[in-house]
Image (cartoon, rainbow, N blue to C red):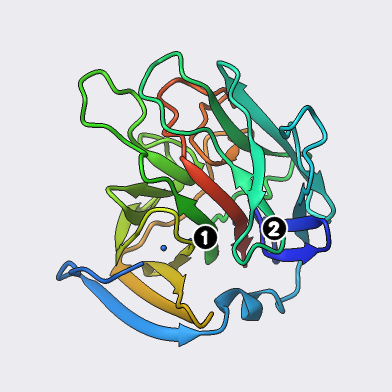
Amino acid sequence: MFTKLSSGLARALFVSIASATAAVSLACSSDAGVEPSTSRSVESAADADSVQARRGGPEVALRVTEAPPFNGHYRTFDNSGTAAVRVSVVSLNGGVLTARAQRGGGGHSIRTPRFNPNTGAPRAVVKILNATATDALNPRTNPFTFGADFTLDGLSSSTARGSVDNGDNLMQRGLFNDSSQYKLELDDNVAACRIGGAQGAVEVSSSVRMQADRWYRARCKRLSGSISISVTFWRANGSAHTVTDTRAGRTGDMTPDRASWPLSVGGKLEAAGAVSSATDQFNGRIDNAILRIR
């Protein structure tokens, strides 16, 4: 969950809020077709987040330390920012989040449980809750952006009968049938954003198909009349290449039924914040999870 700020042995993952903003962070590779109702743009950029990071506003910084403080795994992440949220790790069947190298090898990222199709498999998800009565995770009608950097494991789903965990959800608040939902997921090596509110739901998929064990950055963005997903990947020389796919559509007010709905990173959570066996556990590494509400 996190915008990129590394300092020596620690790694800042941001959940940022601007004018009512929260932040938490992830990423993707090669081109494919685009649906007729979707527009697409391609650009090369040093780092799209470097521009966003210069914008003002409160932010939550969740630090991934070099050595997990609890027996090799994380139970929480330090919030060094000013946004009023609480961050913890929730698990099922002994699932844990550990540390691995970040992109470039200079810091650390979150390692999630590996794929296991069984109902008794270990699961672990980052949970972000409001710390006060103010819902800092609610975009309302404002433009907002969320996403993260990530690598996806080579094995993250199965077509076998009885497999209960074939999704890879990077970030999510709300479920499909709720009055409000925003979600970034990976299915069949393709990232997609779904945002639903009072005026309906809009979903857009990236035209980039990801390769296993390669770093990507995925960002979902909601404006008043469109949803876009931008996927960035890095060439051998270190330069960034970004592909953006946009779909027109209005989603309206994003206020959920209750402000206690958690924002999750690395899988989906139930309304009460619990992990289920079919949590759509993300299988890979996660860094720079962010949510920014303008």
In the rendered image, residue 221, in percent from the top left (x then y), is placed at: 47, 66
* Left or right of 106 in this view: 114: left
Q: Which residue lies furthest to the left in this view?
A: 36
The residue at which mark 2 appears reads as: 14
Q: In this view, does 220 lie above or below 258?
A: below
What kind of element bears circle 2? strand
Q: Mark 1 points at which residue?
A: 141
Q: In terms of image quadrants, where is residue 249? A: bottom left
Q: How far apart are marks 2 and 1 (CA)?
A: 22 Å
**Nearer the N terminus, badge 2 or badge 1?**
2
Counting from the top left corner in percent of width and height, residue 121 is at: 46, 19
| Marks 2 and 1 in Cβ contact (< 8 Å) | no
Badge 1, how many Cα within 10 Å: few under 14, some, many 20+?
A: some
- Quarter of the image with the C terminus is bottom right
The picture places residue 85, in percent across and down from the top left corner, at 75, 44
Which of 49 and 234 lies nearest the eye of the viewer? 234
* Residue 278 as seen in the image, left or right of residue 32: right
